[in-house]
Amino acid sequence: MPLPRDCRALLDEVSAHNARALGRAITLAEEGGDRAGELLCALEEIPLPEAATIGLTGTGGAGKSTLAARLIDHFRASSRRVGLIAVDPSSPLSGGAVLGDRVRMMRHACDKHVAIRSMASRGRLGGLSAATASSARLMKLFGCDPVIIETVGVGQAEFDIVRLADLTALVLAPGLGDDIQAMKAGLIEMADLLVINKGDLPGAEALRRDLEPIARDRGRALLKVSARDGMGIDDMTATLDALFCQASQSGALADKRRRASDAETLDWALELLRHRLEPIVGAQGKALRDKDPRVRAQMAIQDCFLSL
Ligand SMILES: Nc1nc2c(ncn2[C@@H]2O[C@H](COP(=O)(O)OP(=O)(O)OP(=O)(O)O)[C@@H](O)[C@H]2O)c(=O)[nH]1
Ligand SMILES: [Mg+2]
């Protein structure tokens, strides 16, 4: 594995569009710990090209991956490099393997200008969205614009990941009952754009009518598309462009990026603390082991700060 000096060489290869180097760099960042620290410090020295991140979230099976593939087609048609990070909410045991298999089957998997990566959202505790954010930055260095982040909107971890994105589209589809679920989960609040996918299915228009007043009340754009047929995709990319421009000009984008950076900082802080705390907790003697774990945790944190 690369030493600090080699981190810079690895990153130089990434910025020279070497896909294997990108893969290695992302793996390093995902592993966390000191090596990730060295790599990300080296990355800090390199000015990143300006690029957008687009989040796609929504219930399982709504068609997010199919839609992502359509968006990739759109951006590839104007020769843009595109990144796709698919975050799998599956358990660490499967390690995102199921989704990884599906990702490898995507028709863009052999396009060297498309960087595709899948990661489990619940690998270890902490640092999960941090790894996603770092991977997105590495993809930007590789020249990807945009970087698309797909995640199933099922829990807090998935919300956090999608909050890293500049713009988030909530993908809904008829027949999944997710219009109501989405409202309950507050997903609509966090989305910039509501996309009803599977517009080719009979229930799509009814879903659009149901959602229209809700979208209007909250000032959200609402679109009907069919990722299968390609219907409405141009409209979606034009809307994303317009929303991005608006957010840049109003300062909302800068605010959002600041908040995302704060959240990522906190994630890394927890990740770094975890690395330091593990040996301290492991070394606590018998007297401490009989205590309540919360008390043990407080003592471990005290010891950790004393040793800094
Ligand atoms: N009729 C129709 N089917 C679609 C459309 N888009 C996707 N599908 C189908 O819906 C199913 C799920 O599509 P995916 O793209 O895998 O959905 P997803 O949201 O990524 O699913 P997860 O990653 O499991 O959450 C597949 O069988 C797709 O072929 C569409 O526009 N119309
Ligand atoms: Mg998917």
Image: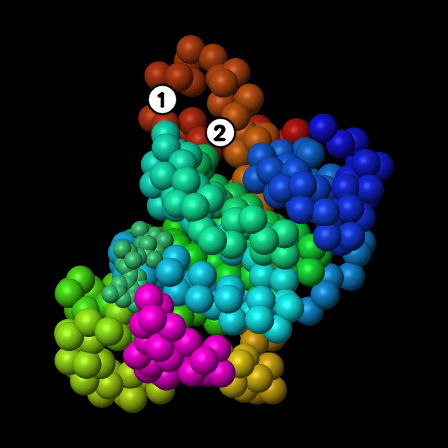
Q: Is residue 6 above or below residue 189?
A: above
The CA distance from mark 2 to mark 1 is 11 Å
**Left or right of residue 101, residue 218 in this image:** left
Residue at the spot 26% in from the left edge and 75% down from the top edge:
199
Amino acid at the residue labelled 2: Met
- Is 90 magenta? The answer is no
The residue under the point 73% across, 62% down is 48
Q: Along the line of sight, which residue is nearer the eye, 11 or 35?
A: 11
Q: Earlier in the sequence, mark 2 or mark 1?
A: 1
Q: At which x and y percent is residue 192? A: 41, 76
Name the residue at 69% across, 55% down.
142
Residue 291's label in the rendered image is: 1
> On the image, numbered disc 2 is attached to which residue?
299
x and y, in percent, of residue 256 in the image: 53, 71
- The residue at 17%/62% (across/down) is 176
Q: Position of residue 137 (x, y in %)?
A: 64, 56
Residue stretch rendered in magenta on the structure: 221-239
Q: CB at mark 1 closer than 8 A to ligand 1?
A: no
Instruction: Depth check: give the residue in front, 260 or 245.
Output: 245
Label 2 close to label 1 by CB (< 8 Å): yes
Q: Is residue 201 visible?
A: yes
Left or right side of 12 for 173: left
- Is residue 233 within the magenta segment? yes
Point out the image quarter for the C terminus: top right
Which residue type carries mark 1?
A: Lys
- Residue 166 showing in the rendered view: no
- Classed neighbour count for the residue bearing mark 1: other residues with Cα under 10 Å, few (<14), some (14–19), many (≥20): few
Dot 2: element: helix
Q: Quadrant of the N terminus?
A: top right
Q: What secondary structure is marked by label 1? A: loop
